[in-house]
Image (spheres, rainbow, N blue to C red):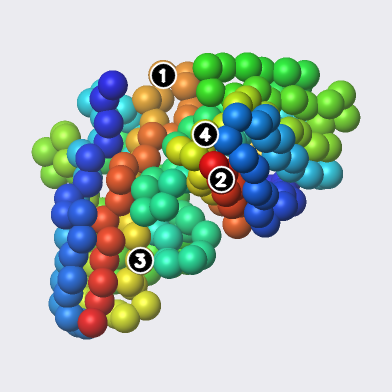
Amino acid sequence: EPEVTQTPSHQVTQMGQEVILRCVPISNHLYFYWYRQILGQKVEFLVSFYNNEISEKSEIFDDQFSVERPDGSNFTLKIRSTKLEDSAMYFCASIPGTGRTEQYFGPGTRLTVT
Amino acid sequence: LAKTTQPISMDSYEGQEVNITCSHNNIATNDYITWYQQFPSQGPRFIIQGYKTKVTNEVASLFIPADRKSSTLSLPRVSLSDTAVYYCLVGVPGYSTLTFGKGTMLLVSP
């Protein structure tokens, strides 16, 4: 069964550094999402992406964040200048867009900002 | 967005049937009820979705009464591997975002 994959599984970075989290959604899926989950808290929506543009974003997704689908397979989340409070699990998700609406989540990237 | 209320936690033993109820008193006409499962350090996984009455798949059943103000996720004969957080979400199926609550932490013991 096809799966969403994410790399790296764990990233440690220093405050102020830029990080790029990578996702490969399931082939032929059309809608893409990033969520994050701070340890012990709820899964929170960050941004959705369709047709090569952001379709929706949350208040969390400020100017420090950006997303890109550079080559038709990868879907990346960039944090320009990480803060301690960016430490969380980041999940990528995708939807086929063929009438089915369940979201398929990746295994996540654990980001630790020191 | 319809607000949902679920128990914070539930305990069960292997082989038992587990029923997790979700309240959604202000569910709208076009809303569906969807359940996701999340294991520790993994992304949520879709379990089941329904609009009314009963839906069953290979993993679970979803019971929705006529007034649709609540729903019950039923897991038959749970095993240790069913220990996870279960989320009830209410909304119009589509391509917009998912809003997760705190979910129900199900602990299955031997």
Residue nearer the viewer, B76 or B87 = B76
* Residue B68 visible here: yes
Q: Give the foreground label among 3 and 2.
A: 2
Instruction: Identify the residue at horizontal 20%, vertical 60% (top origin).
Output: A10
| Image coordinates for residue B48, horizontal then vertical, percent | 57, 27
For the residues bearing labels 2 and 1, Cβ distance under 8 angstroms:
no
Residue nearer the viewer, B87 or A19 = B87
Tag 4: Cα neighbours inside 10 Å, few (<14), some, or many (≥20)? some
For the residues bearing labels 1 and 3, Cβ distance under 8 angstroms:
no
Q: Which mark is residue B79?
A: 4
The residue type indicated by label 2 comes to: Ser
Q: Which residue lies furthest to the left in this view?
A: A71
Instruction: Identify the residue at horizontal 42%, vertical 66% (top origin).
Output: A38
User: How many numbered badges does the structure rendering display?
Assistant: 4
Q: Which subunit holds the residue at mark 4? A: B
* Residue A34 visible here: no
Q: Which mark is residue A88?
A: 3
